[in-house]
Image (cartoon, rainbow, N blue to C red):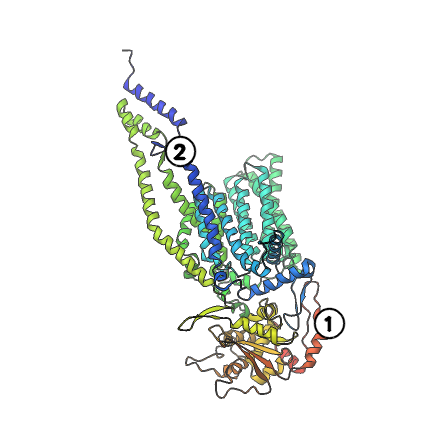
Amino acid sequence: MGGRSPIATGEKNIQNAKADSSVDTEKLFGTFQIPEIFRSIAFAFLLALGIISIFIAFTIRTIAIKQFGTVIHEFDPWFNYRSTQYLYDNGWRAFLNWYDYQSWYPFGRPVGTTTYPGLQITAVAIHALLSSFGNPWRMSLNDICCYIPAWLGGLSTLLVGLLAYECTQSKTSAVFASIIMAMIPSHIVRTVGGGFDNESVAIPAMCAVFYFWTCALRRDNDRPYGNVLYGVLAGVSYGYMASAWGGFVYVTNIIALHTAILTLWDWIQGNYCVGLYQTYTVYWTIGTALATCVPPVGMTPFKSLEQISSLLVFLGVQVLQLSELHRHRIGIPSILSQECFTHRLRYILVSASVVVLACGLLGAGGFFGPLTARVYSLLVQHRRTGNPLVDSVAEHQPMSVEGLWMYSSYAFYFTPIGAVVAAYSRHFRQSSFMLLNLIVSWYFAMKMSRLIIFSCIPCAMLSGTFLGALVDKAWTNLLWSNQVSSLEFSKKRIHRPKTVAWYARLPLDKIPRIAFTLCVTFFLHSTATHASLFVEHCWESAIAHSQPQIVFHHFDGEKHVLVDDYRESYGWLRDHTPIDSRVLAWWDYGYHITGIANRTSLADGNTWNHEHIALIGKCLCSPVNDAHSVIRHLADYVLLWTGGGADDLAKSPWIARISNSVFDDICPNDPLCADFGFRPNGSPSPLMEKSTLYSLQKYSEVDGVTPLTGLFETAYISTHGLVTIYKVLNVSSASKEWVANDTKTRRMNTEGGCHGRYPPAQELQTVLRRGRQMGI
């Protein structure tokens, strides 16, 4: 009778199993111990994939360099290169005070105070660093400018991987995010080799801001000084981005919005996070202080309606912190209590009243600036801003859903699923930032296609989150510890010790986990084809965006021919015209004229003076005799793109609209200039037929075109006829000398504006009086 009962024996077995499970590690299928070397190999494999992703990011961005050599692409990069060369040759102080007399004739342009210098400083710093190493590290400044987008594309890839790890704590997700970031078209579009543009350095800076911001959020409870440290790093990164690109406005607003949302969420949950207050305060203070040192930014963080939200959030968290200090002092215990709500509301109302009063007084005095046309276009419902100069730029047009897919490929499908995974993440404070980033970036991309680049970070991160979560879950479902759960099942239903032991060896509760793993394996196998399609799509997109407009290959039916008409034409200007020659051309080509030809242009991509651009348009759209009477006072040569699908005749409707917005006699009673163009049969409309633009291109080809005798003569036609340069006859030397001697056209006011003047020629002044003011 002294023996133990079967039930007692079974319970003892259960207790022994639990005791064993407390010290036992997880095993594959609960049986096979995973060697530590296997974990090291897995980590090394993921690390290798991460390094490969950086190499891919570099390789896919150097396609153009391999095909065409180290050639600066497009229009804006040529200004960036020219200003970088000026900074390298003359130093920072001269760059800051640089007033460029070769652009925007007769006004000139204060380059140093109107340029985001981060790109130029970065290029010069890299050149100095490599030169300090001596050969074979030395590279020319031109080559460095061509490679910077590829180098920093790899850095962005690394930072997005770190960001994904910070938000998920999953190495697998980090690797997937890095691979996607390396190739996703929305990132490649502005970071190809030779595309020496501001986004090249701004995107890695933005990634750094986001990374340090999320680092601070994760450590806000267990490392009190970590909030300050990462707030400092985020602020410094933000200051660097503000020095490089106007897109810093997006960053300051997205972080301010995230801070406001987290603060409200904490309030609803009955919490208050001092770490969030510390992080945002340090970030905003340092970031704004650095940003105000950037000449184009200045005091706009306090005056611009586009940036004022970050200031309001900064003031808001200060008020909330003061209310919390006072709450603890007077002993209000709970944040969710009515007493605390009344206490906080009192602080908020008093502070809001002060802010509203201050804004009213400052606003009445004109302290705050209006929204720019580009930002206004992001907020209105209609497609156009009302400013034809802004609307004429293709990248300012809205993007369709198909466009989102084209720039995201299969990440377009994975991103929303990753957003759902992130929404239920244990690290919600960090992952919610990427959710917010995705929503806002896709909204802005649908409003303006150029802003699709903002979506590359959340798309890569959230797609990587989804794929990494799948792989991690599938793997962890195969790792079991001792079968405690099965024994608990046995305890409830089975009383015989042999049966208990049998159930312990047969883990029925693991069947769903095995089934899930099999499903994930099947899914990953089925997506292997889509992965190859993703790589193919990204590679094709990279090839397409790596084709520079300034030089390209053309298949003539027998072989591929290198078409270099544009550089040849600018080279002809440089080598065969006087150094003080002035070249009238549409504003698109201004950076090429000054950067490659080293000649004076009338307008360029800075587009600060709408009326002056409209005057150029009027010269091109008016009848030949009327146009010449104005051009002779402003230019020595006229340069036209006269071939290909993007020549000046193709742009003529927009040229006419922009001109008509100031000089309404171009298209009388027709703001959109619908009658300025070509009929379906290819014949010109009457307004087009009379224009100087049409006459210059067609006078030798089409009968009845206004003769150019005594007005213009052809000076140069490029090899393939893509560019034609005309010499202006009977140039007014008096007007040219007047501008050269007029010191008032060489000054700028304290705000950096240009105070140049047109020559007093009666023909020109009569035309100017007919125009109306329309700021851009």
Question: Where 741 sits versus 272, above or below?
Answer: below
Q: How many marks?
A: 2
Residue that extends furthest to the front in the rendered view of this protein:
135
| One can see residue 617 in this view | yes
Q: Amino acid at mark 1?
A: Thr
Percent x, y for residue 217? 53, 42
The N terminus lies in which quarter of the figure? top left
Say if mark 1 contacts mark 2, CB within 8 Å: no
Viewer-proximal residue among 681 and 647: 647
Question: 246 left or right of 58?
Answer: right
Helix or strand or loop: what does disc 1 sit on? helix
**How would you rate the neighbour count of disc 2 (Cα within 10 Å): few for under 14, some for 14-19, many for 20 or more?**
few
| One can see residue 586 in this view | no
Q: Earlier in the sequence, mark 1 or mark 2?
A: 2
The C terminus lies in which quarter of the figure? bottom right
Percent x, y for residue 738? 71, 77
What residue do we see at 45% from left, 41% from top?
Answer: 44
Question: 648 left or right of 738?
Answer: left
Disc 1 versus disc 2: nearer the observer: 2
Q: Amino acid at mark 2?
A: Pro
Name the residue that disc number 1 marks.
743
Q: Tell me the tag on residue 570.
A: none
Question: Where 487 sits versus 138, above or below?
Answer: above
Percent x, y for residue 218? 52, 41
Name the residue that disc number 2 marks.
35
Helix or strand or loop: what does disc 2 sit on? loop
Residue that extends furthest to the top in the rendered view of this protein:
1
Question: 754 left or right of 605?
Answer: right
- The answer for how far apart the CA atoms under marks 1 and 2 are is 80 Å
What residue do we see at 44% from left, 52% from top?
Answer: 180
Percent x, y for residue 568? 54, 72
What residue do we see at 38% from left, 25% from top?
Answer: 20
